Amino acid sequence: MTGWERLGGLPRARLVDARLQLHHAAQPAAAVGKLLLPHQEDYGEQSFRWLASARCLAQAPVAAPIPFRAALRPSAPALLLLAADDAPDADDADNGPQTDDAVDSKDASAAGNAGRAGPRILRELPLGGRTLGEVYGWLAAQLAELLGRPLPGELERPDGLPAHPLAAGGRFDAGDAEAFAEMGRLFANADRALRAWAPTWPGASAVRCWPHHFDIATLASLTPMIPMSPMISMMEADEPSPGVVAAPEEGRTIGLGLVPGDEARPEPHFYVTPFPYPDQPELPPLPAGGTWNTAGWLGAVLEAPRFMDASQDAAAQAEAVETFLRAGAEACRRLLAG
């Protein structure tokens, strides 16, 4: 895997507020897809893909006189509307530098965009000092202008997000630039690592960021099923009754991804999870410091200290993640195979 951007240049506790703010900021951008893109069975119209040339999470193109994508840039944090005809689809976008095995974090942005022109920014709203209400209002006005017609409805403001003052009218605080830059490196690295793994599993889904849980993930099927966010799958889908083996047609999958932090684990972590959960499985040891989570959901976890330690160089961080994903996926495949 090439192009890993070194992590760990600041205390991880500083990432929590930046992560929460970006999680809330992703919702207006995701609402664009829900309102203006064709519905997909897996709700993929609301998802994002990492666009390396612009270092942002970008949606699929919206048809308009100038086709555009709604996007969220982690650093410097901003909501963007990008010209969709200026860059390849996110599925085909380059993942960053291909000449070095790793890059230092201070050079990551420049290296990731070396020799590449990003898409035109049609509209940009820096988030610092704004409320969510102001962001939604600005976005609705810009969308109507780009479409040349009124919007067909309102942009959705979903419930169930992590608590943060933004939800009660607070203002975005973009003051910790280092924390937001680290969040950008996290998403860039996760996208790179997951795309590097995906070709090893025929039929693995595109790497996508799902706005409700804010994880970036891919889903590999052992049998056909409708793909969805692996984190949503393992939290919301019905589990088989104890002792009952899922029929093949019910769909067996392995989800691999990065969660930048959540209520249970505030720090970033990679995961690999089988679905449906096997009954009373024998869990094998995992390399690279991986562990098994068994409370609430079953899956392999690589905690932040294993790939974000400041004492590690970029190559060591990348190797830990690559080894974990490969071994975790194989362990879950064996669990599902019985």
Image: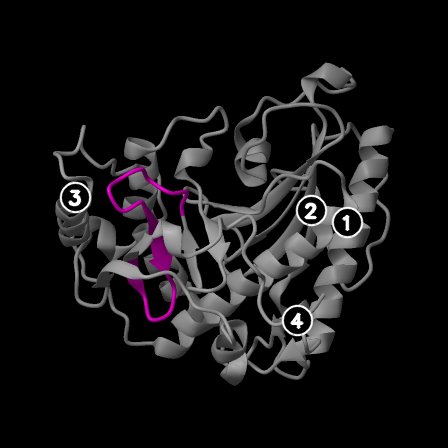
Residue 71 inside the magenta-drawn segment: yes
Q: Are marks 2 and 1 in contact (CB under 8 Å)?
A: yes
- Image point 26% across, 40% down: which residue? 64
Q: Rate crowding at label 2 as few (under 14), some (14 to 19) or many (20 or more) other CA atoms within 10 Å.
A: many
Amino acid type at circle 4 is Gln
Front label number (3 vs 1): 3
Q: Are marks 2 and 3 in contact (CB under 8 Å)?
A: no
Amino acid type at circle 3 is Ala
Q: Is residue 47 left or right of residue 228?
A: left
Front label number (4 vs 3): 4
Q: Which residue is mark 2?
A: 272
Q: Which residue is mark 4?
A: 98
Front label number (2 vs 4): 4
Amino acid type at circle 1 is Gly
* Residues rendered magenta in the picture: 59-79
Q: Is residue 281 visible?
A: no
Amino acid type at circle 2 is Val
Front label number (2 vs 3): 3
Mark 2–mark 4 distance (CA, rounded to whole Å): 26 Å
Pick whichever of labels 2 and 1 is earlier in the sequence: 2
Mark 3–mark 1 distance (CA, rounded to whole Å): 43 Å
Pick whichever of labels 2 and 3 is earlier in the sequence: 3
Residue 328's label in the rendered image is 1
Q: Is residue 46 left or right of residue 328?
A: left
Mark 4–mark 1 distance (CA, rounded to whole Å): 26 Å
Is most of the magenta stretch helix, strand or loop? loop
Percent coordinates x, y for residue 158 in the rendering: 30, 37
Instruction: Report which quarter residue 306 is drawn in.
Output: bottom right
Q: Rate crowding at label 1 as few (under 14), some (14 to 19) or many (20 or more) other CA atoms within 10 Å.
A: many
Q: Is residue 176 visible?
A: yes
- Image point 32% across, 61% down: which residue? 120
